[in-house]
Image (spheres, rainbow, N blue to C red):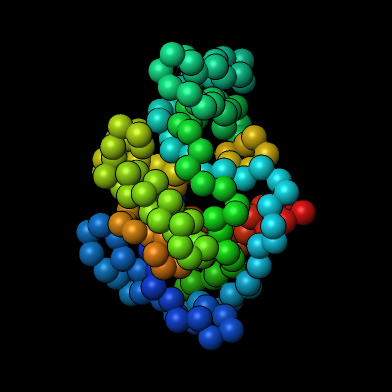
Amino acid sequence: MSDQFRVALVVLACSLLGSLSACTGSSGSGSADRASATTSTTLKLRPATADLQFRPVLRLSAAVEGRCRPPDPSLATDLVAIPSADRSFCYVLGPSAGNAADIAAAHVEQSASDWSVVVKAVPGASTRRLNAFLNACYRGTASCPGVTAGDGGHGAAAVMLDGGVITSPSVNGRDLASESFTIAGSFTEAQATKLAHALNRVGG
């Protein structure tokens, strides 16, 4: 999987005072301080009208002339195969595990070295549903297995919007949805803003 898609999903316990000021991140291997944000733009999500879904990445397969073969329907229901942005490979994704209705808010954050998107789940049933999904990916279970040599056995959570995969970060912590969590990696400002606006665009 290319670096564009191998970004780490890490939990952030945040103090929100109008904007995100400083967070402490934790992963399955321990905790590390994260630099204070120098830029934080909050994007409130409105009721969903577009199709945003969170799905587990079951495997990667080669694209044939930029196209994906449909998954075998005998294996499970609600499987989809989605081409990567450059159509060089395909994501084979499991059943939907959540959607935009499970997300309360998102914002773009700049740290000392990169840009990321911080997300907050809706409390209650949505948080429990997303935690069940993300914890399965963290453990690398059959429903969300590790698919690359560098993922440490953790599964990946694909973010789909209008039939395409925006990103598919590996899940590196437990109970991420219980607090604000970040999709972080080597994002440029434009890439992070595009992802945040894609989440915001769900509101129409």
Compared to residue 31, the image places residue 92 above or below, namely above
Q: Residue at (48%, 23%) from the top-left corner? A: 77
Compared to residue 105, the image places residue 159 above or below, namely above
Q: Position of residue 202 (x, y in %)?
A: 69, 52
Looking at the image, residue 91 sits to the left or right of residue 176; the answer is right
Looking at the image, residue 194 sits to the left or right of residue 112; the answer is right
Q: How many marks?
A: 0
Looking at the image, residue 43 sits to the left or right of residue 27; the answer is right
Q: Residue at (45%, 81%) from the top-left corner? A: 15
Q: Residue at (29%, 60%) from the top-left corner? A: 27
- Residue furthest left as drawn: 29
Q: Position of residue 120 (x, y in %)?
A: 51, 65
Q: Nearer the viewer, residue 74 or 7?
A: 74
Q: Quadrant of the N terminus?
A: top left
Q: Quadrant of the C terminus?
A: bottom right
- Residue furthest right as drawn: 204
Q: Residue at (41%, 18%) from the top-left corner? A: 75
Where, by quadrant of the figure, is residue 153 drawn?
Answer: top left
Q: Is residue 182 visible?
A: no
Q: Nearer the viewer, residue 57 or 129?
A: 129
Where, by quadrant of the figure, is residue 200 drawn?
Answer: bottom right
Q: Is residue 132 visible?
A: yes
- Residue furthest front as drawn: 125
